[in-house]
Image (cartoon, rainbow, N blue to C red):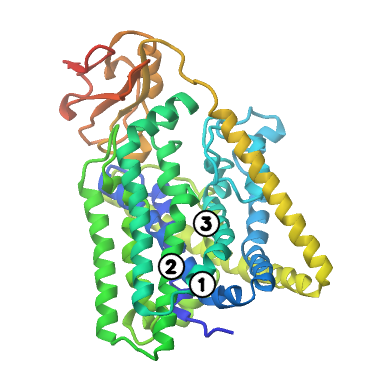
Amino acid sequence: MVKQIPALTGIRFVAAAAVALSHGGSLFLEGTSLALDISIGTLGLLGMSVFFTLSGFVIQYNYGSSIAGSPRKAIPEFLVARIARIYPLFVVLFLVELLTGPMVWPWLLGTKSAAEGFSWHIVPFQLGMIQTWFFANVAGVAPVWQYEAIGIVSWSVSTEWFFYLVFPLVCPLLARIRTVLAATLCAIGAVAIELGIDLAVLMLQDRINLFALHAYGTDSALPNWKNTLILWIVYFSPFCRVWEFVLGCCLAKLHEAWLAQDFRPSRALLDIAAIVGVGAIGWVFWFTAHKAPFGATMSLFDIARNNIALAAPVALILVAAAQPVSSAGRLLSARWLVVLGEASFALYLVHIIIYQRFPAVRWETASQLLGHLGALALAFTLATCVAILLHFGLEMPARRRIRSCYQAASPEQRRRLVRLGSVGLATLVGAAATYALRDAAGDAVTQSGISVVSATYGGNCRWISARGNATGAVAAACNGKDACTFNAAMVRIGDPAPGCAKQFTAAWFCKGDRTIRSSSAADERAMISALQLSCSAVTRAE
């Protein structure tokens, strides 16, 4: 039995709280601050990078030696332990939300039609935890956005499940790492590979966008965001994010190498590493809040901030926190933080369900903002209390029961269970791949002339919440034409950010063209300026 590292449990709560506060901020703190809007979103990105990198560290630290030593016995036990850890609470909350959530329940009662973004077809993939393994456009959205609250946050469960299945394959390679230098080079290599994926996306984003346009429709391409293929590649896809998991595994090997050599880094060196990590994370937040939001194309920073730009500095913090002599290790080992860390998975899953039961309105004054901060604090506290109850009342008993049942089974029963699980997972993955490829087989855009991809009024003021708010109006006026002049004052778009000088932007493409064109009206004249969309030239008429 390996010696536990309390600080790694404590930092799990920090990650869960970051995600919970990010989601709470988007619901409770919607106002007029673009910097606040983007910073809240970045807080969630940070939490996910901590989760994925930390997961690799913990899995390698706890299971690496046993799997490398006796894989036939250890791999099934490892997978059963992982299922017992994540599946019971996930499936209970998923079914509760599916049957009682505001998206589904009115439809079940027959009081309204099914909402956009709801399809029963995705239920098997959600319950099989493979919804992030493929990209598709189902009921108007990608699979990771299905089923309201629990379906949205559970995307990381799917991605983590992929990591767990990959781990036994990379474990023999990790077992060869026995020195500090080898572990360090392995960690650098993991960072370089994920950065290389980001660079490939940067160079190929035009082709990726065009493929998404024709295979899945305009919502799947930039400058839209929520349902885009590029977002799936760089954020949701386990094929990209697995390298953060591998990075964590390499950090665990570094920790093991230090223990084997009885080497204890000085507290000053560890604290410097943690400070550098925190400083780099702070720079990502600062730069994100002070740069212009991306439009029809993304920079390398826009792409990397969704994964490795935050995972790399997180790695420095984890290296320091794993050593009890460091300041980070001492702070994160606080007993109350460790207890909350044990309930972090429950907090991650349940917080959005709690939040969506609270009313959320826009704040426009400082006094309103203070009240919304209080509402967020109350909702977060309630979600934390519910998470603790779920952890000790459901999560832990279910975990013990599943593991004890597996241990009590005969060897033949265990082999039958492994075969059944393998065949079932392979069948589900095959069905999911077929489902995704079916949607990607045709040309979703058939009209000649202009095809509007996205149109936004006030995107410079409200980044995510305003994105695409004028797409329908511009598409209705301009689609199919060779040239179109559109004035924002022609339709009632609404004011996404009172008191902010808003910009009006549009992006479109023309059939047969290999580029996405875009144009914008000046901030101060957005409501009286006219955008000219054309398949012959990109101009703006005033």
Question: In percent of the image, x 35 and y 42: which residue is there?
Answer: 201
- The answer to whether residue 228 is above or below residue 412 is above
Q: Comparing marks 3 and 1, which lies closer to the viewer?
A: 1
Q: Residue at horizontal 24%, vertical 66%?
A: 279
Identify the residue under disc 2. 248
Give residue 302's position: percent from left, percent from top: 29, 45
Residue at the disc numbered 3: 351
Q: Position of residue 62 (x, y in %)?
A: 55, 76
State the residue at coordinates (29%, 86%): 267
Q: Nearer the viewer, residue 229 or 416?
A: 416
Q: Using the numbered discs, state the Cα–Cα distance from disc 2 to disc 3 in whole angstroms.
A: 26 Å
Q: Mark 3 or 1 closer to N-term? A: 1
Quadrant where the N terminus sits is bottom right
**Looking at the image, residue 467 lies above or below residue 69:** above
Neighbour class for label 2 at 10 Å: few (<14), some, many (≥20)?
A: many
Q: CA distance from mark 3 to mark 1?
A: 28 Å
**Image quadrant in which the C terminus is located:** top left
Point out which mark residue 60 bears: 1
Q: Which residue is at the far top?
A: 482
Residue type pointed to by label 2: Gly
- Counting other residues with Cα less than 10 Å from the Cα at mark 1, is it few (<14), some (14-19), or many (20 or more)? many
Q: Does 479 sit above or below residue 49?
A: above
| Amino acid under disc 3 | His
Q: Quadrant of residue 21?
A: bottom left
Which residue: 52% across, 85% down? 3
Mark earlier in primary sequence (2, 1): 1
Q: Is residue 381 left or right of residue 414?
A: left
Estimate how packed mark 3 is, as few (under 14), some (14 to 19) or many (20 or more) residues with alpha carbons within 10 Å: many
CB atoms at circles 2 and 1 under 8 Å apart?
Answer: yes
Q: What kind of residue is marked 1?
A: Gln
- Image spot of residue 204 (x, y percent): 34, 37
What kind of element bears circle 1? helix
